[in-house]
């Protein structure tokens, strides 16, 4: 498990496991008594269409910052943000202020 982010009662994380759309996918689970249950792949939209990689959610759960080499970036890995609007994740926006033609990644929001 990599890039864990606890949002209320939901643990978000990246994992390489059976049932992925690609090598490493974003998943959710419910933490209970030191372990996790109810594992669910975060879906085709986040994993394939948006290309979510190492990620971090804002405290209110309304913004998902992540790294990706998706098309439309400045080069290599870029930082992107997708906002949770009316019950779904809106199209990601390239965070141009922090991206360069080199590699950016591993976002963390305090």
Image (tube, helix red, strand yellow):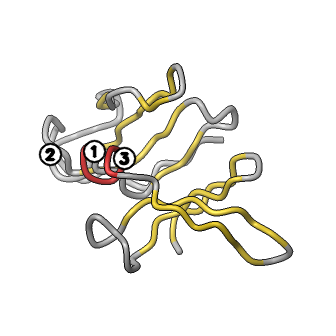
Image coordinates for residue 56, horizontal then vertical, percent: 54, 48
**Marks 3,2: beta carbons within 8 A:** no
Q: Which residue is mark 1?
A: 78
Numbered label attached to residue 75: 2
Q: Earlier in the sequence, mark 3 or mark 2?
A: 3
Which residue has dot 3 on it? 46
Q: From the viewer's perspective, is 21 left or right of 10?
A: left
Of the residues under marks 3 and 1, which one precedes in the sequence? 3
Q: Secondary structure at mark 3?
A: helix
* Spatial CA span between label 3 and label 1: 16 Å
Query: Given the current orientation, which residue lies at the most extreme top position?
Result: 86
Snapshot quadrant of residue 97: top left
Residue at 25% across, 53% down: 103
In the foreground, 100 or 110: 110
Relative placement, left or right, of 93 versus 3 is: left
Residue at (34%, 30%) from the top-left corner? 95
């Amino acid at each position: 498990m990599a890039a864990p982010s606890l949002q209320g009662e939901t643990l978000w994380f990246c994992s390489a496991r059976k049932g992925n759309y690609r090598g490493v996918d974003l998943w959710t689970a419910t933490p209970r008594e030191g372990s996790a249950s109810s594992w669910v792949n975060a879906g085709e939209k986040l994993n394939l269409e948006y290309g979510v990689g190492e990620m971090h959610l804002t405290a209110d759960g309304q913004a998902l910052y992540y790294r990706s080499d998706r098309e439309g970036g400045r080069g290599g890995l870029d930082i992107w943000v997708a906002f949770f609007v009316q019950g779904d994740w809106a199209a990601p926006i390239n965070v141009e202020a922090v991206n360069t033609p080199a590699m950016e990644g591993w976002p963390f929001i305090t």
